Image (cartoon, rainbow, N blue to C red):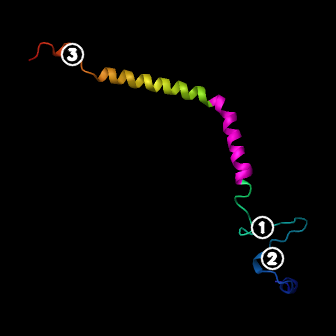
Amino acid sequence: MRLTTVLRDEVFGKISNRVRGIVIYKLSPYEQRAFAGFLKNGIPNTVRRVAENLPYLVPFVFINYFIYSEAEKEYKRLMRKNPADYENEE
């Protein structure tokens, strides 16, 4: 370790971060604002993106719902007993 790094009050772990011609900026996680602009930009952006994709999604949702409901009706119809099979029983 060179004496100049000690005189500059640098930490031992930061000695190797110095590369000639490359500047590295770091921001402490405690200084970052994770939810900066969430209400102002995030929610409107989400609404816009969902609205853009609705024309592609809605037809498939309706088609799948129709297929599902018709399949459920047919399943319930097939699971019913036929009353004609039990006419002669007492």
The residue carrying mark 3 is 83
Query: Of the residues under marks 2 and 1, which one precedes in the sequence?
Result: 2
Please state which amino acid type lies under the numbered disc 1.
Leu
- Tag nearer the camera, 2 or 1: 1
Q: CA distance from mark 1 to mark 3?
A: 77 Å
- Going from the N terminus, do you reach mark 3 or mark 2 first? 2
Query: Please, which residue is most extreme toward the front here?
Result: 40
Q: Which residues are magenta?
A: 38-56
Q: Percent from the top left, x then y, of residue 16?
A: 80, 73
Horizontal relation, residue 61 to residue 56: left or right = left
Q: Classify mark 1: helix, strand or loop.
A: loop
Q: Position of residue 56 (x, y in %)?
A: 65, 29
Q: Position of residue 86 (x, y in %)?
A: 16, 16
Q: Is residue 26 left or right of residue 78?
A: right
Q: Quadrant of residue 90?
A: top left
**Residue under label 1:** 27
